[in-house]
Protein backbone atom coordinates (compact mmCIF):
# COMPACT_ATOMS: atom_id res chain seq x y z
CA UNK A 1 0.00 0.00 0.00
CA UNK A 2 1.37 3.36 -0.99
CA UNK A 3 1.39 6.21 1.58
CA UNK A 4 -0.31 9.39 0.38
CA UNK A 5 1.66 12.43 1.65
CA UNK A 6 -1.08 14.84 0.56
CA UNK A 7 -3.62 13.02 2.68
CA UNK A 8 -1.25 13.11 5.67
CA UNK A 9 -0.69 16.86 5.16
CA UNK A 10 -4.44 17.50 4.97
CA UNK A 11 -5.04 15.48 8.14
CA UNK A 12 -2.33 17.39 10.01
CA UNK A 13 -3.91 20.71 9.05
CA UNK A 14 -7.36 19.57 10.08
CA UNK A 15 -5.88 18.57 13.44
CA UNK A 16 -4.37 22.01 13.93
CA UNK A 17 -6.25 24.59 15.93
CA UNK A 18 -6.53 28.10 14.57
CA UNK A 19 -4.90 30.50 16.99
CA UNK A 20 -6.77 33.74 17.46
CA UNK A 21 -4.42 36.43 18.56
CA UNK A 22 -5.45 39.34 20.74
CA UNK A 23 -5.48 42.72 19.03
CA UNK A 24 -4.81 46.20 20.35
CA UNK A 25 -6.22 49.65 19.82
CA UNK A 26 -3.31 51.92 18.79
CA UNK A 27 -2.60 54.96 20.95
CA UNK A 28 -3.09 57.83 18.50
CA UNK A 29 -2.35 60.62 20.98
CA UNK A 30 1.31 60.70 20.00
CA UNK A 31 2.50 60.30 23.61
CA UNK A 32 4.32 57.01 23.08
CA UNK A 33 4.73 55.60 19.58
CA UNK A 34 4.21 51.89 19.02
CA UNK A 35 1.92 51.35 21.98
CA UNK A 36 -1.78 50.84 22.34
CA UNK A 37 -4.46 49.43 24.58
CA UNK A 38 -5.97 46.04 25.28
CA UNK A 39 -9.00 45.41 27.51
CA UNK A 40 -8.58 42.43 29.82
CA UNK A 41 -11.21 39.66 29.71
CA UNK A 42 -12.27 37.23 32.43
CA UNK A 43 -10.31 34.37 30.84
CA UNK A 44 -7.05 36.26 30.19
CA UNK A 45 -3.83 35.08 31.80
CA UNK A 46 -1.16 37.79 32.04
CA UNK A 47 1.39 35.47 30.39
CA UNK A 48 -0.92 34.93 27.40
CA UNK A 49 -1.57 38.65 26.99
CA UNK A 50 2.19 39.32 27.06
CA UNK A 51 2.87 36.55 24.53
CA UNK A 52 0.28 37.88 22.08
CA UNK A 53 1.98 41.28 22.09
CA UNK A 54 5.56 39.89 21.79
CA UNK A 55 6.53 40.99 25.28
CA UNK A 56 6.87 39.62 28.82
CA UNK A 57 4.85 40.05 32.01
CA UNK A 58 7.67 42.08 33.66
CA UNK A 59 7.69 44.43 30.64
CA UNK A 60 3.89 44.77 30.89
CA UNK A 61 4.28 45.68 34.57
CA UNK A 62 6.72 48.46 33.63
CA UNK A 63 4.25 49.80 31.06
CA UNK A 64 1.34 49.51 33.54
CA UNK A 65 2.30 50.75 37.04
CA UNK A 66 -1.28 50.06 38.22
CA UNK A 67 -1.30 46.56 36.74
CA UNK A 68 -4.71 45.50 35.33
CA UNK A 69 -6.09 42.70 37.48
CA UNK A 70 -9.73 42.17 36.52
CA UNK A 71 -11.92 41.89 33.45
CA UNK A 72 -12.55 45.29 31.88
CA UNK A 73 -9.23 46.76 33.06
CA UNK A 74 -7.10 48.24 30.31
CA UNK A 75 -3.49 47.26 29.60
CA UNK A 76 -1.03 49.50 27.76
CA UNK A 77 0.74 47.11 25.37
CA UNK A 78 3.25 47.19 22.52
CA UNK A 79 0.90 47.67 19.58
CA UNK A 80 1.79 46.64 16.05
CA UNK A 81 -0.79 45.50 13.57
CA UNK A 82 0.12 41.93 12.66
CA UNK A 83 -1.44 40.64 9.48
CA UNK A 84 -0.38 37.02 9.81
CA UNK A 85 -1.72 34.30 12.08
CA UNK A 86 -1.03 30.60 12.43
CA UNK A 87 -2.78 27.27 12.80
CA UNK A 88 -1.40 25.87 16.02
CA UNK A 89 -0.07 22.33 16.30
CA UNK A 90 -1.92 20.97 19.36
CA UNK A 91 1.08 19.08 20.76
CA UNK A 92 3.54 22.00 20.96
CA UNK A 93 4.07 25.77 20.86
CA UNK A 94 4.48 25.92 17.08
CA UNK A 95 2.03 26.17 14.24
CA UNK A 96 1.71 26.44 10.47
CA UNK A 97 1.66 29.55 8.33
CA UNK A 98 0.97 29.47 4.57
CA UNK A 99 3.05 31.93 2.55
CA UNK A 100 1.17 34.41 0.36
CA UNK A 101 2.31 36.59 -2.53
CA UNK A 102 4.60 39.38 -1.35
CA UNK A 103 5.72 37.68 1.88
CA UNK A 104 9.30 38.10 3.04
CA UNK A 105 10.90 35.92 5.69
CA UNK A 106 11.83 39.00 7.74
CA UNK A 107 8.20 40.21 7.84
CA UNK A 108 6.92 36.75 8.73
CA UNK A 109 9.46 36.48 11.56
CA UNK A 110 8.38 39.83 13.05
CA UNK A 111 4.70 38.81 13.06
CA UNK A 112 5.58 35.63 14.96
CA UNK A 113 7.87 37.34 17.52
CA UNK A 114 11.03 35.64 16.29
CA UNK A 115 13.89 36.16 13.85
CA UNK A 116 14.81 34.71 10.46
CA UNK A 117 17.44 32.38 11.97
CA UNK A 118 14.85 30.73 14.20
CA UNK A 119 12.46 30.31 11.25
CA UNK A 120 15.29 28.69 9.28
CA UNK A 121 15.89 26.25 12.18
CA UNK A 122 12.21 25.36 12.26
CA UNK A 123 12.18 24.91 8.47
CA UNK A 124 15.46 23.23 7.48
CA UNK A 125 14.28 22.77 3.88
CA UNK A 126 13.88 26.52 3.48
CA UNK A 127 16.43 27.69 0.91
CA UNK A 128 17.59 31.12 2.08
CA UNK A 129 14.65 33.51 1.71
CA UNK A 130 13.16 32.07 -1.49
CA UNK A 131 9.50 31.94 -0.56
CA UNK A 132 6.71 30.90 -2.87
CA UNK A 133 2.98 31.42 -2.36
CA UNK A 134 1.42 28.27 -0.93
CA UNK A 135 4.57 27.21 0.91
CA UNK A 136 3.78 26.02 4.44
CA UNK A 137 6.16 27.14 7.17
CA UNK A 138 6.40 26.03 10.77
CA UNK A 139 6.35 29.13 12.98
CA UNK A 140 6.25 29.91 16.71
CA UNK A 141 2.56 29.96 17.63
CA UNK A 142 2.09 30.20 21.41
CA UNK A 143 -1.06 32.33 21.08
CA UNK A 144 -4.16 30.79 22.56
Image: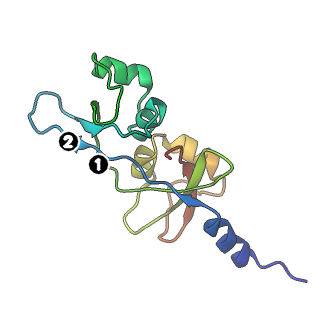
Q: Which residue is mark 1?
A: 81
**109 with respect to 29 (left or right):** right
**33 with respect to 4 (left or right):** left
The relative height of residue 1 versus residue 118 in the rendered view (above or below) is below
Q: Position of residue 127 (x, y in %)?
A: 59, 57
- Do callouts 2 and 1 mark residues in contact (Cβ within 8 Å)? yes
Q: Quadrant of residue 16?
A: bottom right
State the separation of the CA atoms marked 2 and 1: 9 Å
Q: Which residue is painted at 39% across and 50% down in the image?
A: 107
**122 with respect to 44 (left or right):** right
Figure coloring: rainbow
The label on residue 26 is 2
Q: Position of residue 7 (x, y in %)?
A: 71, 77
Chain-order first, disc 2 or disc 1: 2
The relative height of residue 61 versus residue 130 in the rendered view (above or below) is above
15, 95: nearer the viewer: 15
Q: Which residue is painted at 40% across and 47% down in the image?
A: 111
Q: Position of residue 50 (x, y in %)?
A: 42, 33
Mark 1 lies on a secondary structure that is loop
Mark nearest the camera among 2 and 1 is: 2
Q: Which residue is painted at 65% across and 57% down in the image?
A: 125
Mark 2 lies on a secondary structure that is strand
**Farthest left residue?**
29
Q: Position of residue 105 (x, y in %)?
A: 46, 52
The label on residue 144 is none
43, 113: nearer the viewer: 43
The relative height of residue 22 versus residue 14 in the rendered view (above or below) is above
Q: Quadrant of residue 118?
A: top right
80, 52: nearer the viewer: 52
Specify the quadrant that holds the N terminus: bottom right
Q: Residues within 10 Å of mark 1 (few under 14, many from 20)?
A: few
Amino acid sequence: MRFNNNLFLLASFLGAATAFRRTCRPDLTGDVRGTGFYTKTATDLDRDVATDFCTTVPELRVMNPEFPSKAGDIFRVPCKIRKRDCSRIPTNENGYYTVVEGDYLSDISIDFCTDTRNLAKLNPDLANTNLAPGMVLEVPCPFN
